Amino acid sequence: MQVSTERLRVSLAGASGYAGAGCLRLLLRHPGVEVVEASSKTQPGRVHRDVYPGSDCDLTLVGELDASHCQAVVSALAPGEAARSAPDWLAAGAVVLDLSADFRLRAGYERWYGGPHPSPGLLPEAVLALPELSPQPISEARLLALPGCFSTATLLACGPAAARALVEPEAVVDGKSGISGAGRSAGSQYLFGELDESVSAYSVSGHRHQPEMEQALSDLAGQPFQVTFVPHLVPMTRGLEVSCYLRLRPGVELDQVRRAYQDAYGGQPFVRLAERPVPTKQARGTNLCWVSLERQGPHLVAQAVLDNLGRGASSQAVQVLNLRFGMDPRAGLEETPWWP
């Protein structure tokens, strides 16, 4: 088979936010990718390195992408924005990877995002792209929806147990995330003086990632799967941890659960099974998700940590892009954490 040396032409929408800038940094260093265009709703006409600290990118940002120039669009726009632009991107022949929530949910978008879906006709073809556990093939999809950061960690922590029917179909998930999860435009509650030396729960009555978790775990389990999820904001810049509490089915032992996770993740480059819980810093700056499993009485405690801006957003997008276009899944991605 002849291997093409032509690089994949990729455009990036939303390059001035944390997730979008993270994608841009990775894609510019990717050996198989050429970034042909980058957009920003708030900074059109400016050079990227002048609007994002630490950037060495000399691309001039446009207000709207012309997808006829590329083979793939990676969108890091706010919820609702990608869904309005996706029909045009797809019509131009581009594969679309969306980091927002626009195409994750098959139903319930209006409830969680406050308005009707801008492109409901595209929902049936969207593939939830969690590489290790995707219930649908990524390689042929033209519209790929990346799960949220909390969803990614929870699904990787709970997915194999749910898929093998090792636990009852319900989970309690305690999540903690760094401040960067709020994005670059934040309110007064995210100021240093408000956040420092304090931990706070939020969205206790229902968080937007909860229905994502329930939908995906129900698909894996083959039956309705209920999730109770409470996220917490902690005073660190980046990083995410979930502790998931699941009731083991009668007769299921911890060794059996650990074998199931080894079967699921043994050949995967970006999920690491740990003997004990690891700190969030052990995933910082990487595409890694660390998963640990313990038993407490009748319950399985499945814990996962990842970088919310990496594996929870930008680097996972690059991993999915690699898989979609038949490239090495490790291409362009770091596996060594920023330590300390």
Image (cartoon, grey):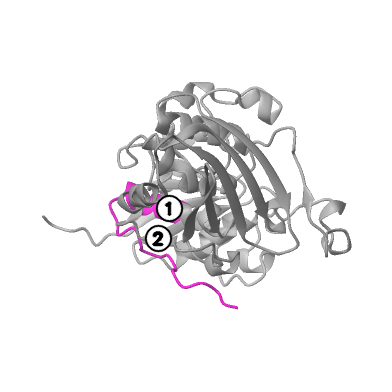
> Which residue appears farthest toward the bottom when viewing the image?
340
Please tell me whether the stretch drawn in magenta is mainly helix, strand or loop.
loop
Residue at 13% in and 57% down: 2
Residue 244 percent across, percent down from the top left: 57, 46
Question: Label 1 near label 2: C-beta < 8 Å?
Answer: yes
Question: Closer to the camera, 178 or 14?
Answer: 178
Sequence-wise, which precedes: disc 2 or disc 1? 1
Q: Quadrant of the N terminus?
A: bottom left
Residue type pointed to by label 2: Glu
Residue 23 percent across, percent down from the top left: 52, 58
* Magenta stretch encompasses residue 201: no
Question: Closer to the camera, 225 or 324?
Answer: 225
Residue at 34% in and 41% down: 138
Image quarter for residue 36?
bottom left
> Which residue appears farthest toward the left when viewing the image?
1
Q: Which mark is residue 170?
A: none
Specify whether 181 is left or right of 125.
right
Secondary structure of residue under mark 2: strand
Residue 31 percent across, percent down from the top left: 35, 67
* Magenta stretch encompasses residue 339: yes
- Mark 1 crowd level (few <14, some 14–19, many ≥20, 10 Å Cα): many
Residue 172 percent across, percent down from the top left: 61, 39
Q: Which residue is mark 2?
A: 34
Is 224 rendered above or below residue 36? above
Q: Quadrant of the C terminus?
A: bottom right
> What is the span of residues highlighted in magenta in the rendered image?
317-340
Residue type pointed to by label 1: Val
Is 339 rendered above or below residue 187? below
Residue at 53% in and 22% down: 120
Question: Closer to the camera, 114 or 174?
Answer: 174
Q: Which mark is residue 10?
A: 1
